Image (cartoon, rainbow, N blue to C red):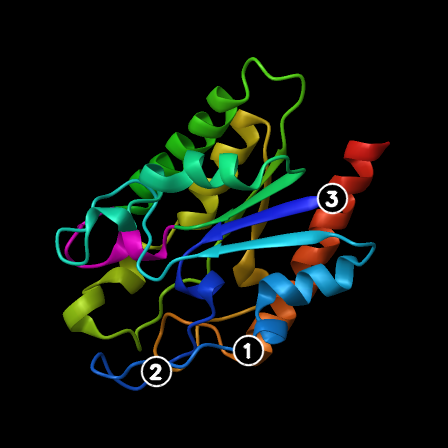
Amino acid sequence: MTTVLCFGDSNTWGCPPYADLTEVPERIAFAKRWTNVMGAAIGGGVHIVEEGLSGRTTVFDDPIEGIHKNGARTLIAIIESHAPMDVIVLMLGTNDFKDQYAISSFNSARGMLTLVQMIKGHYALADGSPEILIVTPPAITEDAEPAMWGDGHRTCAGHAYYLAQVAERTGCFHYDANRVVRAGSDGVHLDEASHAALGAALAREVKAILAMRQG
């Protein structure tokens, strides 16, 4: 069984764009989330592990919603829970740009670097290790609620550039989601059409990775 772990935030969980911060969002249907659109497009009995958590950061503790939002605190446990796996897709960084963190795109990418180093360190003595695909999430737009996101639409500029550098220097793969999607009406979350487009695009990326891995 080929296994692909998707480790991300609310855009992996399936949160649609919503009108205001007091609204409890519905969850996009299972089959329409990008993770499962991707799995269906890959085909061949690929098992998709969907590990999305709303508010998840790369490596930063959330002083408001809880330290469990820090991706570094749960990543290895999740990897061990779902082992063995062939590909790990990391799509994180959006929440790093919340106003409360005051994080630059460079430092968000450094957070991703820490996650990659954790994965590679975990498999250092293993016979084999999964491939890692770093996905730059959709850029925050000016529609994002300023009370939560502040100048996030500005501070996230350069995110794809720095994540591509992380991928190149660590032997990982990189894909910029902004090539095919844009954040929805709330400036942060993907709508169903964008989930479909991203799932199709990432299916091509993962299929190529798997073909290389098996070849």
Sort mark 1 into few (<14), some (14-19) or many (20+) by Cα contacts within 10 Å.
Answer: few
Residue 21, horizontal then vertical, whole percent: 22, 79
From this view, report whether residue 186 is shown above or below residue 122. Answer: below
**Which residue is tagged 1?**
29
**Which residue is tagged 3?**
2
Kindly check if marks 2 and 1 are in contact, taking CB atoms under 8 A apart as contact.
no
Q: Residue furthest right?
A: 215
User: Is residue 101 one of those drawn in magenta?
Assistant: yes
Residue 208, quarter of the rendered image: top right
Give the foreground label among 2 and 1: 1
**Which residue is tagged 2?**
18
From this view, report whether residue 158 is shown above or below residue 149. Answer: above
Give the foreground label among 2 and 3: 3
Image point (54%, 16%), residue name: 124
Q: N-terminal of the two: label 1 or label 3?
A: 3
Q: Element under label 1?
A: loop
> Image check: 40 left or right of 60?
right
> Image check: 9 left or right of 144?
right
Sort mark 2 into few (<14), some (14-19) or many (20+) by Cα contacts within 10 Å.
Answer: some
> In the image, what residue type sits under mark 1?
Ala
> In the image, what residue type sits under mark 3?
Thr
| Label disc, if present, on residue 150 of the rendered structure | none
Image point (21%, 44%), residue name: 61
> In the image, what residue type sits under mark 2?
Tyr
Please state the extent of the stretch shown in magenta in the rendering. 93-103
Prevailing secondary structure of the magenta residues: loop
> Image check: 185 left or right of 132?
left
Residue 31, quarter of the rendered image: bottom right
Residue 76, horizontal then vertical, whole percent: 43, 34
Residue 82 visible (yes or no):
yes
